[in-house]
Amino acid sequence: ADGSLRKGLETFYSALNGSSWNRHDNWCTDAPLFEWYGIKAGSVVSKAIFGDDGFAYFGTDDRWTMDLAGNNMRGRIPDAFWKACGCFESIRICNEYLPDSSFPDYVWNENLLSVDLSMSFMNVSLTSIAQATNIQSLSLQACKVSGIPAGITSCRYLRELNLRECGISGTLPQNLGSLSSLAVLLLEPAAAVRGERRLHARELRGGERRLRAAGRLEE
């Protein structure tokens, strides 16, 4: 997994003009990945591995975090990177200008805990967001997002959702209020997003029992 991630990060560096980044310490060197700027080791997860003899052996999966916010990146994030980043539990690529980049559906998975692409102007599909069953924080401000799918209600640990300036219109998922951990919801500043009913802080039964709505949710 380390080898495929390393190759994926190398393609990321090359495609986004890494030599011009504000910080690129140790990138594309033989140094351990946790010494590459912005890449850190995350949690270690135990897993069962079944051998050819039919017995189960216990091994580990390493998780990683990426934080390259405001690092002067330009270009298009390559598919080779996204396909190699299934081991990330946190991805933070914000305050960049990457309008030609997309966050593909297949990146959503149970390992993700936090995704912050705010002010990156990426195209983001939430169609498969239900696969990110453990996600806790999702910030997509100023990204291009077509809508909020009903599957987001499967993200029962979601505490913060920022979809401001995403150009979203249409209706809110009917059961959005069932996300008991949701404490912060930031939506369009205009009245473009409509709900089946008003969504009040009292409907958010868990967490801090508060809702900051940037704008109105109309009936």
Image (tube, helix red, strand yellow):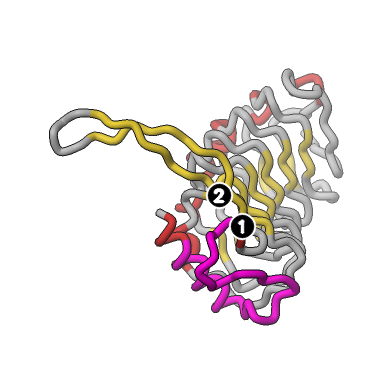
Please state which amino acid type lies under the numbered disc 1. Answer: Ile
- Where 142 sits versus 71, above or below? above
x, y percent for residue 100? 61, 73
216 relative to 52 in the view: left or right: right
Name the residue: 61% across, 48% down. Answer: 90
Residue at the spot of label 2: 64
x, y percent for residue 171? 67, 41
Q: Quadrant of residue 74?
A: bottom right
Circles 2, 1 touching at the beta carbon (< 8 Å): yes
Q: Dot 2 lies on which element?
A: strand
What quarter of the picture does the C terminus occupy?
top right
Residue 30 seen: yes
57 relative to 215 in the view: left or right: left
First in sequence: mark 2 vs mark 1: 1
Residue at the spot of label 1: 39
Name the residue: 71% across, 49% down. Answer: 139
219 relative to 6 in the view: left or right: right
Residue 146 seen: no
Name the residue: 45% across, 53% down. Answer: 106
Please state which amino acid type lies under the numbered disc 2. Answer: Trp
Q: Nearer the viewer, residue 168 or 20?
A: 20
Give the residues in magenta: 6-34
* In magenta stretch: residue 68: no
- Total of numbered circles in the picture? 2
The residue carrying pointer 2 sits among few (fewer than 14), some (14 to 19) or many (20 or more) residues within 10 Å by Cα, namely many
